């Protein structure tokens, strides 16, 4: 089973919406059984150790499926995503999220 993590900082209010979107995408793709581990990032040191560039951050087997710019510094902050229509959002575009899950989930999970 893949490891799916939602890293968040409690100072940012968007992580519950990101979790709902993630669970919805997993359900839509036929994988409601996959668990999502919530990982709270509390300190700047922890943010640096985890290469955490803001809340919410999704990782599948350690890979950020919607990677930030390479020069984005780790910190306790709210993350900003770009939607497909060009607007900014505190959570990933749902279509980008589904595409990322399709791309990163192991084939054996996708075909189950």
Image (cartoon, grey):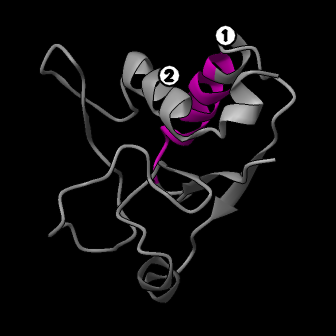
Q: Which residue is mark 2?
A: 98
Q: Secondary structure at mark 1?
A: helix
Answer whether labels 1 and 2 touch (C-beta < 8 Å).
Answer: yes
Q: Residue at x 32, y 52 (%)?
A: 67
Q: For the magenta stretch, what is the residue range?
A: 12-25
Name of the residue lying farthest toward the right: 33
Residue drawn 48% across and 37% down?
Answer: 14
At numbered mark 2, what does the secondary structure look like: helix, strand or loop? Answer: helix
Q: Residue at x 77, y 22 (%)?
A: 31
Residue to which mark 1 is pinned: 28
Q: Please say whether residue 18 is one of the residues in the magenta stretch.
A: yes
Residue 1 in percent (x, y) is at 81, 47
N-terminal label among 1 and 2: 1
- The image's mark for residue 58 is none
Q: Where in the figure is residue 100, as x and y percent of width and height? A: 45, 33
Indicate the position of residue 42 as horizontal and vertical percent values: 57, 74
Image position of 22 with respect to 42: above or below: above
Q: Position of residue 111 (x, y in %)?
A: 74, 21
Relative horizontal placement of residue 95, taking residue 34 as reference (left or right): left
Q: Is the residue marked by circle 1 packed among few (<14), some (14-19), or many (20+) residues within 10 Å?
A: few
**Is residue 39 highlighted in magenta?**
no
């Amino acid at each position: 089973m893949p490891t799916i993590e939602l890293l968040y900082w409690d100072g940012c209010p968007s992580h519950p919406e990101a979790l709902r979107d993630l669970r919805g995408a997993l359900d839509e793709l036929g994988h409601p059984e996959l668990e999502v581990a919530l990982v709270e990032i509390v300190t700047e040191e922890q943010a640096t150790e985890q290469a955490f560039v803001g809340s919410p951050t999704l990782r599948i087997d350690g890979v950020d499926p919607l990677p930030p710019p390479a020069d984005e510094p780790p910190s306790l902050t709210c993350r900003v995503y770009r939607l497909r229509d060009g607007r900014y959002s505190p959570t990933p575009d749902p279509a980008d999220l589904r595409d990322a899950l399709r791309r990163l989930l192991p084939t054996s999970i996708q075909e189950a």
